[in-house]
Image (spheres, rainbow, N blue to C red):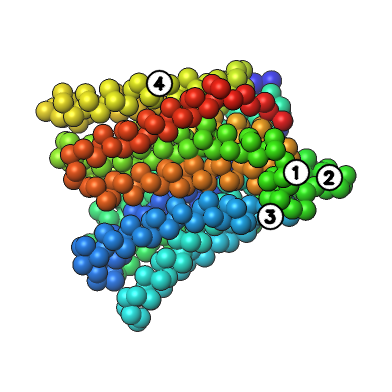
């Protein structure tokens, strides 16, 4: 049966994919829209100076990345002890609370330091929510999907970070440019945050109607579940080896690639072509809108071939393409309109999201159901959250430095090579 026909005719898989995916999409939307609003909130709402705004934006954004691997170690065992469904329901409550905190807090009635603490708390809640949602959702869909179509169905969930970023950019620019300066300062900036609340409530209500993963229920009935997943993971040499190898071979290269394409490249192009932040956002909106289906196509192809082999091929392409891209853009294309460089930018971005399309299945298939949630969460949030987040940190601290892109290129290339070498020399067999 074809993928589309299976999705259309199997109403249970349809409900699982759509309702799980919508919740994860809202998580990523909320994570990115607050990031876009940080500079405005700190400077215009709380009244910090430009230098203070930059520093506070760095701190809060950085906390969002750092908290993810820490929360993964602390909280992801819940996914394997309590269940997949209960954790992505809890994650929706946490992400909704973060939106309410930032969007409804009466900043003018308190000292601005209180406002900063509220925003910092909201960012921590977001990091925790992403940890609980991503690993439980991936495990949930992977365990529901037919064996021969697991790559396709997990890739549908992998579209949500990209689409969440797209939605956040569209909403931010829409509210910014359709509101007067006074309205945006008073209420308008809050609306993109509060826009998702009715959808969060709807997703929460509908997600409650989903049954727990059949495989997880079967495991509980047989009393084969782990009561201490983190301890069992650490005490199992083979599982521990896979966690370490997948962190360096898959998660870290993927995290670097993802944040290079979503965080640094717009800034780099803005400096090279002297375009405004709004023009950078428009560029990214066009780029994502055109390319996001690539993730699903890669997912379908993944079911017909070896996952890690494809990951290694894409990684090798990135190792060769990245220096070529930066050299051509900086030395040849900078004299033309940015849209002449759009095909080169598309290739850069497609390589990044193709790598991301592979991650979910690779992580899920390498771990047993008893430890799957924990074993997915730790490598993913360490690689995507921490090492990927360093891209933002380096970009911020060295903004305007003419050698910044070469430093980031060196950083990413070294980690890509480590990942490529690890895949090449360490065999990982699906569990």
Q: Are marks 3 and 2 in contact (CB under 8 Å)?
A: no
* Numbered mark located on residue 370 in the image: 1
Residue 341 at x, y percent in the picture: 23, 26
Q: Are marks 4 and 1 in contact (CB under 8 Å)?
A: no
Query: Which structural element holds mark 4?
Result: helix
In this figure, which residue is indicated by the disc labeled 4? 317
Examine the rendered structure and indicate whether residue 386 appears above or below residue 417: below
Residue 82 appearing in the image:
yes
In front here: 352 or 163? 352
Q: Are marks 2 and 1 in contact (CB under 8 Å)?
A: yes
Query: Which structural element holds mark 3?
Result: helix
Which is more N-terminal, label 1 or label 4? 4
In front here: 207 or 235? 235
Residue 190 at x, y percent in the picture: 37, 64
* Numbered mark located on residue 224 in the image: 2
In front here: 231 or 303? 231
* Numbered mark located on residue 351 in the image: none
Which is more N-terminal, label 3 or label 1? 3
Q: Are marks 3 and 4 in contact (CB under 8 Å)?
A: no
Residue 201 at x, y percent in the picture: 57, 59
Give the farthest residue toward the top. 305
Mark 3 to mark 4 CA distance (whole Å): 38 Å
Rendered residue at 58%/61% (across/down):
93
Query: Which structural element holds mark 2?
Result: loop
Figure quadrant of the N terminus: top right
Rendered residue at 43%/21% (across/down):
316
Tell me the crowding category of disc 1: few under 14, some 14 to 19, or many 20 or more residues within 10 angstroms, Cα based. many
Query: Which structural element holds mark 1?
Result: loop
- What count of labels does the image hold? 4
Which is more N-terminal, label 4 or label 3? 3
Which is more N-terminal, label 2 or label 3? 3
Residue 129 appearing in the image:
no
């Amino acid at each position: 049966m074809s993928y589309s026909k299976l999705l259309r005719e199997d109403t249970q898989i349809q409900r699982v994919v759509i309702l799980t995916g919508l919740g994860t999409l809202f998580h990523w939307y909320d994570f990115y829209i607050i990031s876009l609003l940080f500079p405005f909130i700190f400077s215009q709402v709380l009244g910090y100076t430009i230098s203070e705004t930059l520093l506070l934006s760095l701190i809060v954004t950085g906390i969002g990345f750092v908290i993810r691997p820490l929360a993964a170690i602390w909280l992801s065992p819940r996914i394997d002890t309590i269940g997949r469904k209960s954790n992505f329901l809890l994650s929706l409550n946490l992400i909704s609370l973060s939106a309410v905190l930032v969007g409804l807090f009466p900043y003018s009635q308190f000292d601005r330091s209180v406002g900063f603490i509220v925003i910092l708390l909201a960012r921590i809640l977001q990091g925790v929510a992403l940890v609980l949602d991503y690993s439980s959702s991936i495990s949930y869909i992977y365990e529901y999907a037919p064996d021969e179509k697991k790559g396709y169905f997990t890739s549908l969930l992998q579209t949500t970070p990209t689409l969440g970023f797209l939605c956040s950019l569209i909403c931010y620019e829409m509210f910014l440019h359709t509101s007067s300066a006074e309205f945006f300062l008073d209420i308008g900036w809050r609306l993109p945050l509060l826009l998702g609340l009715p959808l969060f409530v709807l997703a929460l209500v509908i997600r409650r109607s989903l049954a727990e993963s059949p495989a997880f229920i079967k495991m509980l009935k047989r009393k084969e579940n782990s009561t201490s997943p983190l301890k069992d993971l650490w005490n199992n040499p083979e599982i521990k080896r896979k966690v370490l190898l997948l962190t360096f071979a898959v998660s870290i290269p993927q995290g670097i690639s993802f944040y290079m394409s979503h965080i640094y490249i717009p800034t780099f192009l803005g400096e090279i072509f002297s375009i405004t932040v709004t023009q950078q956002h428009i560029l990214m909106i066009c780029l994502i809108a055109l390319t996001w289906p690539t993730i699903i196509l890669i997912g379908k192809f993944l079911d017909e071939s070896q996952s890690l082999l494809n990951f290694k091929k894409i990684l090798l392409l990135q190792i060769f393409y990245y220096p070529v891209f930066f050299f051509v853009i900086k030395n040849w294309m900078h004299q033309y309109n940015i849209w002449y460089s759009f095909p080169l930018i598309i290739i850069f971005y497609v390589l990044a999201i193709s790598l991301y399309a592979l991650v979910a299945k690779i992580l899920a298939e390498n771990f047993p159901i008893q430890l799957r949630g924990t074993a997915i969460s730790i490598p993913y949030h360490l690689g995507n959250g921490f090492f990927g987040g360093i891209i933002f940190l380096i970009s911020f601290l060295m903004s305007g430095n003419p050698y910044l892109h070469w430093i980031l290129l060196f950083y990413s290339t070294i980690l890509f090579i480590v990942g490529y070498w690890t895949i090449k020399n360490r065999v990982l067999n699906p569990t």
